[in-house]
Image (spheres, grey):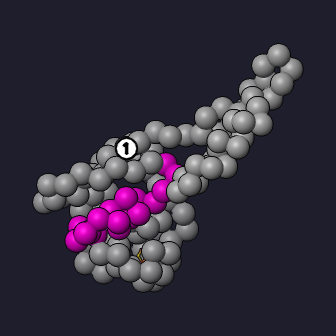
Amino acid sequence: MGDFLGYLRNMKGHRLTIKRSVTMNNQQTVVSPDRACYQVRVMNESRCFETNSQNNVLASMGWAENSPVPVGCKGGGCGKCRVKVTSGTYLSKKMSRAHITPRDEEQSIVLACRIFAQSDIHLIPLEA
Ligand code: FES
């Protein structure tokens, strides 16, 4: 068990989220974190970006040269990363009402830096 926890601590660049734990032979066993990978596709963009439920959707594109979605503050404050999600499911964190209205949210218009994919996602970048 100690070796396994050491292995987890040394996984640089990965944010660790333990989804659940199970009991086996009266010992608590750590179950692997959610590592499901999803694809992000952007309209009129030939590249496909890989993401997971632990990183926001903008982060999957923000590392790329010439990101198809503008990268600004990366924290939900500037509105540069406004997108319309045309398919897929996601979880979202609180978004600034200065950039995303309740009506926007109903129409799946969100800030890419504040959403987390739960499936493959298709989106259209919007002007901020
Ligand atoms: S990058 Fe500024 S709101 Fe997303």
Whether residue 71 is in magenta: the answer is: no
Asked if one can make out residue 4 in the rendered structure from this viewpoint, the answer is: yes
Q: Residue furthest right?
A: 26
Q: Percent from the top left, x then y, of residue 28?
A: 80, 29
Q: Is 25 above or below relative to 13?
A: above
Q: Percent from the top left, x then y, of residue 119?
A: 39, 42
Q: Quadrant of the C terminus?
A: bottom left
Count of all numbered marks drawn on residues in the image = 1
Quadrant position of residue 22:
top right
The residue located at (23%, 57%) in the rendering is: 42
7, 95: nearer the viewer: 7
The residue located at (72%, 36%) in the rendering is: 3
Does residue 29 appear to the left or right of 64 in the view shown? right
- Find disc 1 in the rendering and name its residue: 38
Q: Percent from the top left, x then y, of residue 68?
A: 23, 67
Q: Quadrant of the N terminus?
A: top right
Q: Is 20 above or below relative to 88?
A: above
> Could you say whether the residue bearing mark 1 is in a helix, strand or loop?
strand
Q: Quadrant of ligand 1?
A: bottom left
Does residue 27 appear to the left or right of 127 in the view shown? right
Q: Is 110 above or below relative to 55?
A: below
The residue located at (37%, 59%) in the rendering is: 60
Where are the magenta residues, as a range?
Answer: 53-69
> CB at mark 1 closer than 8 A to ligand 1?
no
